Amino acid sequence: MVDCKNWFRFAVFGALFLSSKAITHIWHILNAKEKEPVTILVTGAAGQIGYSLVPMIARGEMHGLDQPIIMHMLDIEPAFEALFGIKMELIDSAFPLLRGLALYDVLSRLRMLMRNIAIMVGGFPRKQGMEKKDVMSKNVSIYKAHAKALEQHATPDCKVPANTNALILKEVAPKIPDKNITCLTRLDHNRAMGKIAEKLQHQVGDKKNVIVWGNHSSTQYPDANHAVVKTNKGDKQVKELQRGAAIIKARKLSSALSAASSTCDHVHDWMLGTPKVATQPLGRGCRWGVCSDGSYSIPQGLVYSFPVTCRNGTWSKKMDATAKELSEERSLAHTCSST
């Protein structure tokens, strides 16, 4: 026969224990302090990439779902009406994390120091038939003006993810440390992952350790020599990419959604860290352009895409392969790009 008194005591003590745990959890939630807002500048915010990017930022995809955002959006004067329309759409979307919005048509008019992130995606758009060098030549003057304004208004710890004009920013804005200026080759890494997944008919999340060497151009070298794919029989080593030109041919416009998504991925990993476990989709890091320190025989000072890992808002080059292996792959990349 069941001892009713003992059972009752057990039930009472159990209920009290669970109640105390619940009360403690609720107390922590109610007393948790909200994070200080992060201020983010987006140049070219009225453009294709900017239009796709700013709602991702406001939704928390870049800095996390608990990080409030103050967004500064900049574009040229002829695009200011469109920029105001985007502001209205952001307000209408009622993003809980969005704590403030400011619009600018000239970077030098910023009324406060840029303390956190300046995402430089504004510039002359690539059109059908144009190579990257053609676009870069048109964007030199734009990026020089942006770099001078950053030199004047940005704090030294401001992080500046840019596109293929990162070297111009580095040269014209010396106040910003080299490690705080990075090139957005994450798009090329995501493309390589996607194309390998498509070709092998596996999910993107089943791939890891894909590398992209070089610059965001037709001479870059997507490297699958260290890539593996997860199969039912365990990990299997993976043994092509002018994607941008193909998208322009299909859409009559350059990449926007994928560029915005990869920009979001880039800053997310920079600020929140790359996966710590090698079995996760990115492997032990991500791939984006950084200022070379001379390692892997890449000339010092050149902005070049490397495999990196991120922790606590900083990055470092990291790869399981030896320097000799990577130098050999770099030589192969140069050979492929010159033929």
Image: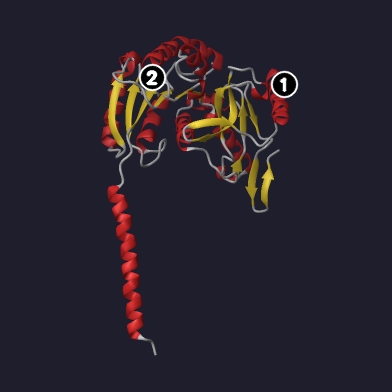
Q: The residue under label 2 is which amino acid type? A: Ala
Vertical position of residue 110 compared to residue 268: above or below:
above
Residue 120: x and y, percent? 43, 21
- The tag earlier along the polypeptide, 2 or 1, is 2
Residue 53: x and y, percent? 40, 30
Disc 2 crowd, CA 10 A, few/some/many (<14, 14-19, 20+): many
User: What's the distance in space between the residues labelled 2 and 1, CA to CA?
Assistant: 40 Å
Nearer to us of marks 2 and 1 is 2
Residue at 34% over, 23% down:
73
Quarter occupied by residue 286? top right
Label placed on residue 133: none
Numbered label tally: 2
Vertical position of residue 42 compared to residue 138: above or below:
below
Quarter occupied by residue 4? bottom left
Residue nearer the viewer, 130 or 250 = 130
Residue at 32% over, 79% down:
8
Residue nearer the viewer, 33 or 159 = 33
Residue 190: x and y, percent? 54, 34
Could you tell me which quadrant the C terminus lies in? top right
Q: The residue under label 1 is which amino acid type? A: Thr
Residue nearer the viewer, 251 or 295 = 295
Q: Check if mark 2's residue and mark 1's residue have beta carbons within 8 Å.
A: no
Mark 2, residue position: 154
Quarter occupied by residue 156? top left
Mark 1, residue position: 335
Residue occupying the far bottom of the picture? 1
